Image: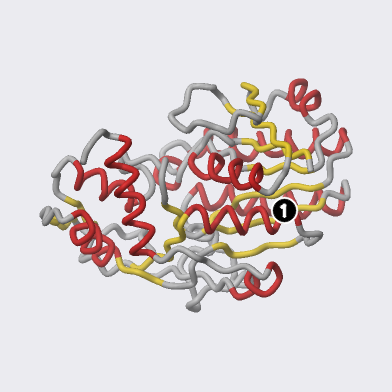
Amino acid sequence: MNILVLGGGGFIGYHLVNELVTAGHAVTVVGRSRISARPLPTQVQYLSGELADSKLMRKILQGVDAVAHLVSGTVPSTGDKDPGKDVEINLLGTLSLLEDMAACGVKRILYLSSGGTVYGKPHEIPISESHILDPICSYGVVKVAIESYLKLYETKADLQPIVIRASNPYGPYQGNLGVQGIIGTYLNLALSRQPIEIWGDGSTVRDYIHVRDLVSLGVAALQSGRVGTYNGGSGTGTSVLHIAELVQEITGNPIPIVYKPHRSLDVPVSILDVERAKKDFNWNTKISLRDGIAGVWTWLKESNGSS
C-alpha cells in the first residue's frame, strides 16, 4: 500500500514508518520540519507541512491508500495549560484532514488515541474498549472528540477508521525532558546522575508497552480490513516506584529518589485489556519491560557517547 504517515518524524511515528517499510509498504511522511534526530529510511519521502493546510494535503493525498494519523501538538501535561491550542491544532486539524480525505476518496485511516486519558478514572481493571469514556484532562477530551468525528465520517463519507488507544509507550528516540514518558526521563536522569522525582508514594500503576510492540499492532490493524477501536498495551500494570527501582538496577546507578506531593488528577491505576487486539490481529507483545528498559539504556548511552 501507499501509506501517508502524519507525524512520522515523532517518537512513535518514526518506529511506525520503519515497521511499515519493513512490511513492504511505500511510505510518505508529512511533518513540521525535516530537522530530527530520528533518521528515517532513505526510501521514505518526507514533506514539510501542516495538517490544516488543506491545499497541500489534498495534493499529497492523491494516490494514497491509507493514512496513519499520529500528529499531536500537545501532550497530557501541556493540553490543560492551553485547551484552545489543543482544540485548534489537534481537533480542528483532524477535522480538516477528514474533509480532505473524503474529497480525495481516501478511505482508510489509522488513528493513535490515548488509552491513558480517554477513560479517566477506571471503574474496572483491566480497562476494556467498552469502558465509559470520561477523560479528566483536555488532551483526553480532544482525543475522545476526534474518535467521535471518526465515527461520524465513517457514516458520512464511508471512511474506514481504526483507532488504537495506546497505553504508555516507551523506547529509543523518546523525548526525555520530563514532559511525557517516565522511563526515558528516569534513564536520562540516571545517565546524568540526577535524582529521580516521584509524585506521591510511587504506588501509581500504569501499563507500559515498548514502542516496537505498539507499532507492530498499528501495522497489523492498518493492513486488516477491520474498523473499530482497540486498546494497545501490555495488559500488565507496573508501579512508578518499581520503574524507578528497575532503572536503578539496570543502570547500576543507585540514584536517590525524591518524593513530591501527590497530584490529585493522577489516576491511581490504569491497565488496559488487550484481549480484543490479540484475538483479532493474532498479535502479542514480545518485549518484556526489563529487556525493553535495558535496550533503551544501551541506546541512550550509545547516543550520548557513554560507555
x, y percent for residue 61? 79, 31
Helix, strand or loop at disc 1?
Answer: helix
Residue 278 lies, with reference to residue 6, above or below; the image says below
Give the residue pinned by disc 1: 222
x, y percent for residue 301? 27, 41
Q: Residue at x 46, y 36 (%)?
A: 82
Q: Residue at x 36, y 61 (%)?
A: 291
Of the pair 165 and 300, the residue shown nearer to us: 300
Residue 69's image quarter?
top right
Colour treatment of the image: secondary structure
Of the pair 174 and 134, the residue shown nearer to us: 174
Image quadrant holding the N terminus, namely top right
Residue type of the residue flagged with mark 1: Leu
Pointer 1: residues within 10 angstroms few (<14), some, or many (20+)?
Answer: many
Image quadrant holding the C terminus, namely top left
Of the pair 289 and 142, the residue shown nearer to us: 289
Residue 206 lies, with reference to residue 299, above or below; the image says below
x, y percent for residue 60? 77, 26
Tell whether 115 sits left or right of 144.
Answer: left
x, y percent for residue 47? 65, 23
Query: What is the total number of numbered labels drawn onto the structure image?
Result: 1
Residue 93's image quarter?
top right
Tell whether 41 sits left or right of 282.
Answer: left
Tell whether 291 sits left or right of 212.
Answer: left
Tell whether 159 sits left or right of 217.
Answer: right
Q: Residue at x 25, y 33 (%)?
A: 305
Q: Residue at x 26, y 67 (%)?
A: 242
